[in-house]
Amino acid sequence: MTESPKRIVVGLSGGVDSAVAALRLVRAGHEVIGLFMKNWEDDDTLMQCSAEDDIAAAVEVAEHLGIPIRRVNFAVHYRREVFEQALRELRAGRTPNPDILCNRHIKFDRFLHHAREQFAADAVATGHYARLGRASDDGPALLRGFDPDKDQSYFLAGVSRTALDTVRFPLGDSTKETIREEARSAGLPNFDRPDSTGICFIGERDFTRFLQRYIDLDPGPILTEDGREIGRHQGLAFYTLGQRRGLGIGGDPDHGAAPWYVADKDAHRNALLVVQGHDHPWLQSAAVETGPFHWLAPIPAEGARLQAQVRYRQRPRAGAVAHTDDGGVLFRFDEPQRAATPGQYLVLYDDDQCLGGAAIAAAHPADRGNPPTLQTHPTEVV
């Protein structure tokens, strides 16, 4: 059914996805306003140039489509509500997901309220690859995007349910290839602009070097499973479970040439624990537990069979859900999962419907003998 014309504010980033989202809404007869959000202030000259390129690209798109474009600066809010929270998590030894925090606090909160208050918008739209349905009278259902390689529902699991009532995802039923072709056919000036792969609003950069501006180095030992020190780390905050690159571990005659992976962090000893082998038992978890869970759908029954992801672009993994006393969930996987990481999000699905998500507080080891520590990191509720 065709939607009646509305005033819709589109988040124009300068990329091709948001450009085609705006294009489709214009063609559907809506009154479209572009809004470029600047959410990061930086003294890095290269990053400033990149931001200026983004603004210029967004303005070009708006001019091509014949729509007005405005700018807004949410940098103060981003630093307080996203970046400082991520730093707290990193200092506590966890690995946060800034993109989920950004969607929750900036793109579908600050942006949404600004669009309503400043432009009397009926709705906002973005270039996310996700869909909306209505499964019940409880509100909209968040669904996976049609393209499994681009589906971004995982990053939207923390968005408030009420926000979804006034959000549009024009690209949800499309593949990236069709979006590129549509942009080219429409003559959009950014049809071949490369996709951004950096962290939300912070951009593409050496993230470890970037974090060292905000987190002090705290070197300590890198230990093997038999307790041998084979190197030194820069600080536990700069590593994540399952990581292979950047460990600085050379050849070791007692362990052979197989690559090393981060298996755990021991805060008491300030030690990074590493193992050899991509699928080493110490990297496997039978279950994960969260703090209070953010539900986007009616809460499933105890023991319900669902699918889960513990990282973006992971193939959905089957298992059963249990509820904890603090409103969290314990999800038991049918098969052990590799590198389930405290701080990252557990997102639950019932087929294509995203049920919600929460940060992982603990990863419960599979049968792996005597692990050096239990991967338990109390997670701050956001």
Image (cartoon, rainbow, N blue to C red):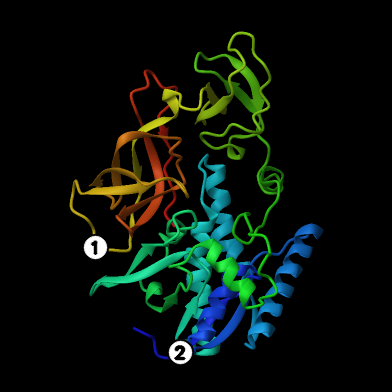
Q: What residue type is labelled 2?
A: Lys
x%, y% of residue 328? 30, 50
x%, y% of residue 348? 33, 52
Residue 367 location, quadrant: top left
Mark closest to the chain's N terminus, 1 or 2: 2
**Residue bearing mark 1:** 298
x%, y% of residue 106? 53, 68
Is 167 drawn above or below residue 348 in the view shown? Answer: below
From the viewer's perspective, tell me whether residue 167 is left or right of residue 215: left
How many neighbours does mark 1 have within 10 angstroms: few (below 14), some (14-19), or many (20 or more)?
few
| Secondary structure state at the residue bearing disc 2 | loop
Q: Which of marks 1 and 2 is in front?
A: 2
From the viewer's perspective, tell me whether residue 1 is left or right of residue 73: left
Which residue is drawn at the image coordinates 45% and 89% (left, top)?
Answer: 6
Which residue is drawn at the image coordinates 67% and 57% (left, top)?
Answer: 203
Q: Can residue 320 be seen in this view?
A: yes
From the viewer's perspective, tell me whether residue 373 is left or right of residue 82: left
Residue 283 location, quadrant: top left
Of residues 325 and 244, the one drawn nearer to the viewer in this rendering? 244
From the viewer's perspective, tell me whether residue 224 is left or right of residue 213: left
Of residues 200 and 223, the one drawn nearer to the viewer in this rendering? 200
Is 91 drawn above or below residue 34 in the view shown? Answer: above
**Residue bearing mark 2:** 6
How many neighbours does mark 2 have within 10 angstroms: few (below 14), some (14-19), or many (20 or more)?
some
Of residues 246 and 57, the one drawn nearer to the viewer in this rendering? 57
Q: Real-space Cα distance between discs 1 and 2?
A: 29 Å
Q: Which amino acid does label 1 sit on?
A: Pro
x%, y% of residue 339? 46, 35
Which residue is drawn at the image coordinates 53% and 75% (left, top)?
Answer: 21
